[in-house]
Amino acid sequence: MSDSRPIGVFDSGLGGLTVANAIKEKLPNENIVYLGDTARVPYGNKSTFLVTGYATQITNFLLGENAKLIVVACNTASALALPALQSKYQVPILGVIIPGSQAAVHATRNKHVGVIGTIATINSNAYNKVLNEIESSIQITAQACPLFVPLVEEGWLNGPVPSEITASYLKSINVANVDTLILGCTHYPLLKPMIRDHVNDNTVLIDSAETVAKETATILLEKKMSADGSNKGLLKCFVTDSPIQFEGIAKRFLGYSLDNVQTVPIH
C-alpha cells in the first residue's frame, strides 16, 4: 500500500537541506516538507528549554502538513530535544547523532574520533555518550565552532576570513591526531572543502546525511509507509524569515533552484 504523505525535515536554518537532499536522492519517490527556522538561527547558543520549545512548535507545523515521519536535521536539536519529541509524538522521529556516530566508529582506524559542532551540541556530550556506547575504547576530541553556522547562513563559504577561522578551530583536532572527524552540525558540510584543507591528510570527514537517509528508508519499509514508484517526489520548503537569502545560498550547494519557498510564522 502506497503512502504519499511527506517526510518532514527541519533545521535551525538551511544546513538541514543537506539531509533533505540526501533523502531526496535515496528516496526519489518520497515527498519532503522542509522547514528552516531562519528567524531563530543559530540554535547552538540557546538553552535546552528554548530549543525544545522551538522543536515542538516546528514538529506541530510539520504534522499539520501531514508528515508521516520527521527527521530532526539539526545536531543541536537532536542533542537537546529529540527525547522529548519522541516521547510526545506517535510518528517516527529520527535525529542525526546516532547515525553519524555509527558511521564514525565504522570509519576510524586508530579509534580516535574528532567532533566539531555548536557550543550546545559539544557541551551536551551527546556524541561522546553515543560513541562510547557503540565502542567504549573510542577516544574523542571535541571542538565547538560557533562561527561556522553564521558563516554558512551569510554565504561565507570560502576566502581568507573563513579560512583563518577554520584553521583556528581545527588546531586541537589536528594536534590530537584524530583520523575521523564528525561534522556535528548539518551546516558544516557546506564548509567541507574549507575543512578538508585544514585537517591532517587522510582524515575521514563524516557527514551524517547519507546515513540518515538510509535509516529513513529502512523505517519506511519496515512500517510499510513508503510511497510507490509511480509517485514523483516533491520538495516543499518553508522558512520563518525572508526566503531570499535562503534561496540564494541553497542554490549554490544543491545545484538547482528551490521554487516557491514560503515564509510561515511559527508559534
Image (cartoon, rainbow, N blue to C red):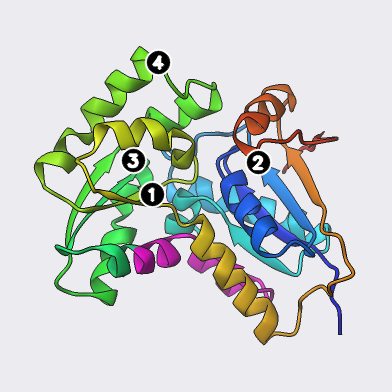
> Which residue is denoted by mark 2 in the rendering?
36
Q: Which residue occupies 73% across, 42% down?
A: 266
Q: Which residue is more in the foreground, 249 or 48?
A: 249
> Which residue is denoted by mark 4 in the rendering?
159
Give the structural element (helix, strand or loop) at label 1: strand
N-terminal label among 3 and 2: 2
Give the structural element (helix, strand or loop) at label 2: strand
Give the amino acid at mark 2: Gly
N-terminal label among 4 and 1: 4
Q: Give residue 267's position: percent from left, percent from top.
A: 72, 43
> Which residue is denoted by mark 1 in the rendering?
184
Report how far apart the C-alphas of labels 1 and 3 lie in the structure. 11 Å
Q: Which residues are magenta?
A: 82-103
> Which residue is denoted by mark 3 in the rendering?
119
Give the amino acid at mark 3: Ile
Quadrant where the N terminus sits is bottom right
Give the amino acid at mark 4: Gly
Quadrant for residue 170, please give it: top left
- Of badges 2 and 1, the one in the foreground is 1
